[in-house]
Image (cartoon, grey):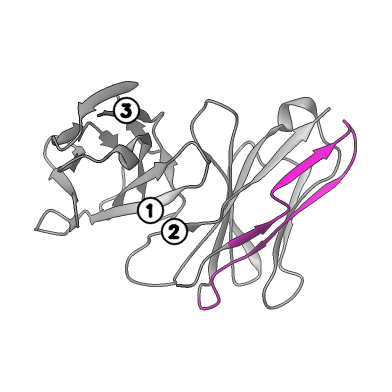
Amino acid sequence: EPEVTQTPSHQVTQMGQEVILRCVPISNHLYFYWYRQILGQKVEFLVSFYNNEISEKSEIFDDQFSVERPDGSNFTLKIRSTKLEDSAMYFCASSETSGRYEQFFGPGTRLTVL
Amino acid sequence: AQKITQTQPGMFVQEKEAVTLDCTYDTSDQSYGLFWYKQPSSGEMIFLIYQGSYDEQNATEGRYSLNFQKARKSANLVISASQLGDSAMYFCAVSGSARQLTFGSGTQLTVLP
């Protein structure tokens, strides 16, 4: 069964450093998303991406964040200068263009900022 | 704006019994979808069930069913014949025209042997 994959599974970084989180969505999906979950809290939407551009973003997704689809398979989230409060689980998800909107989530990347 | 309310932070159920997890929603979209995801202690988000706002029948997927009451804006998840492996956090979510999911705060379900 096709699945969303994410790398790395765990990333530890120093405050102020740049990190890139990588995702490979399901191959025939065209909508991509990033969500984050701070430990013990609910999952929060960050950004959605369609047709090589951002379609929606939340207030969390400020200038420190960017997304990119550098090739036909990868979808990345970059945090330019990490803060302590960026420590969270980051989930990538993808969905088809039409019909049911269910989003399939990757296993997540746990980001720890020291 | 969309909002999900899950009022049960924790629930306990005896193995093999049925359990209902509550979810109420608020959305200004006429067409929307309601979802339930399971998050075990390992952390991944597992899609369980989907209900479209125009679906006349309640959704069912194996042991999971969604009790959709549109007038009450509720979308409760019913798990029949609970198993020990059902112990997890359960999140209700809504999506509308913007497609992104808005999640509730979750319900931690513990299945007792």
| Disc 2: CA contacts within 10 A as few (<14), some (14-19) or many (>=20) | many
Q: In this view, does A69 lie above or below A28?
A: above
Residue B112 percent coordinates (x, y): 26, 27
Q: Name the residue under label 1.
A: B47
Q: Name the residue under label 2.
A: A103
Q: Mark 3 points at which residue?
A: B110
**Numbered range of the magenta stretch:** A5-28
Task: Give the position of the C terminus of chain B as an image quadrant.
Answer: top left
Q: What residue type is labelled 1?
A: Phe
User: For the residues marked 1 and 3, what is the alpha-carbon distance in whole angstroms?
Assistant: 19 Å
Q: Which amino acid does label 3 sit on?
A: Thr
| Disc 1: CA contacts within 10 A as few (<14), some (14-19) or many (>=20) | some
Q: In this view, does B55 lie to the left or right of A77?
A: left
Assess whether mark 2 and mark 3 are in contact (beta carbons under 8 angstroms). Answer: no
Q: Is residue B76 above or below residue B7?
A: below
| Mark in front: 3 vs 2 | 3
Q: Is residue B95 left or right of residue B58?
A: right
| Mark in front: 2 vs 1 | 1
Q: Is residue B68 left or right of residue A9?
A: left
* Residue ID at (32%, 29%): B109
User: For the residues marked 2 and 1, what is the alpha-carbon distance in whole angstroms?
Assistant: 8 Å
Q: Is residue A95 visible?
A: yes
Asked which secondary structure carries label 2, the reply is loop
